[in-house]
Image (tube, rainbow, N blue to C red):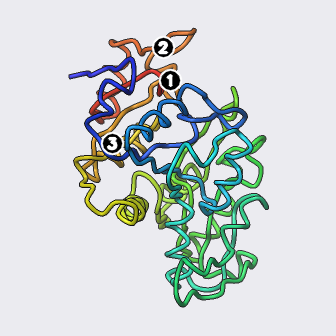
Amino acid sequence: MLNILNDFKQVSDQYKCVFCDLWGCLHNGKESFQKSLDALLNFKKNGGIVILLTNSPRPSETVKKQIEHLGIAKFYFDEIVTSGDAAQLALFSGEFGKNIFHIGTKRDLSFFEIRPKLLSTPINVNLVDISKASSIVCTGLFNNLVEQPSDYDEIIFEGISRQLPFLCANPDIQVDFGHQRLWCAGAIAENYEKSGGTSLYFGKPHKPVYDLALKKLHEINPTVSKSEIICIGDGILTDILGGISYGLDTLFVTGGLSDQDTGTTNGELSPNEEKLTSFLQKANVIPTNSIGYLR
């Protein structure tokens, strides 16, 4: 049964913590959404804890600086946990060897910087050509403004022929940059798997990033239970599926990635019930609540 909200306040008093997605819920890569930020601020003023939970492949410190430029200041949230944080824990523990072939932009090189607080004894990694690599790490496309996942078929073929594991630092398939939809690392990882390779994920909807977010939450307030957390996001197969799989309530923001599929378009503030029902049935994922835009 659908439960469509007009305002987050309708359910916010049922929870002590929000795990909120960033891209698509609070900003579109070019500008932030003030009404969404205000909703989080009101939640915090009423004693709630806000943890931004993002599939960004970059470490949380880097993301914090990035979103400051979009007007998302520290007073809107308590902590940031990224897919990059969770993937770094695996990388620097040595699970993928020391010689890494990197797929992604130069902006994502912060992923390979060791942070003292991450692990007590992290290994050192080297970025090498794929012919010398022990594994592949993908933070995104080399240039997602012009490239498609199919542009990586040769790399995928070579990686699989050498039986290299593929660490995907961002499980998202696509993201909206302003009004342009761009491909993410998850699309390449998906093709790698379909071609017979092994892809490993650490961001939403997978467990490692939720474990890390829960750890950060309990450092703030160790008494908060899972039943007192709600996951907010616009990715039905990442944010919402991940929250459900982890045993958390969810709030699906229909006006993000699925705006066309849910009829949250042309100035509509709420989804079309018939389209939303059909979309959720096809995805086989039922959120606790849905809302057009976080507000």
Q: Alpha carbon of mark 2 to alpha carbon of mark 1: how far?
A: 8 Å
Q: Is residue 177 left or right of residue 49?
A: right
Which label lies toward us, 2 or 1? 2
Secondary structure found at label 3:
strand
Proximity of marks 2 and 1: CB atoms separated by less than 8 Å: yes
User: What number is the disc on residue 255?
Assistant: 1
Residue located at (35% from left, 63% from top): 218
Secondary structure found at label 1:
loop
The amino acid beneath tag 3 is Ile
Pointer 2 residue: 269
Q: Position of residue 115 (x, y in %)?
A: 62, 77
Q: Few, some or many C-alpha atoms within 10 Å of disc 1 (few <14, some 14-19, many ≥20)?
A: many
Q: Position of residue 187 (x, y in %)?
A: 57, 49
Q: Position of residue 103 (x, y in %)?
A: 69, 63
Pointer 3 residue: 230
Compared to residue 162, the image places residue 169 above or below, namely: above
Q: Position of residue 74 (x, y in %)?
A: 60, 49
Secondary structure found at label 2:
loop
Q: Alpha carbon of mark 3 to alpha carbon of mark 2: how far?
A: 21 Å
- Image quarter in which the N terminus is found: top left
Q: Looking at the image, is mark 3 or mark 1 earlier in the sequence?
A: 3
Residue located at (39% from left, 66% from top): 219
Q: Alpha carbon of mark 3 to alpha carbon of mark 1: how far?
A: 18 Å
Q: Few, some or many C-alpha atoms within 10 Å of disc 2 (few <14, some 14-19, many ≥20)?
A: some
**Front residue of 27 and 105:** 27
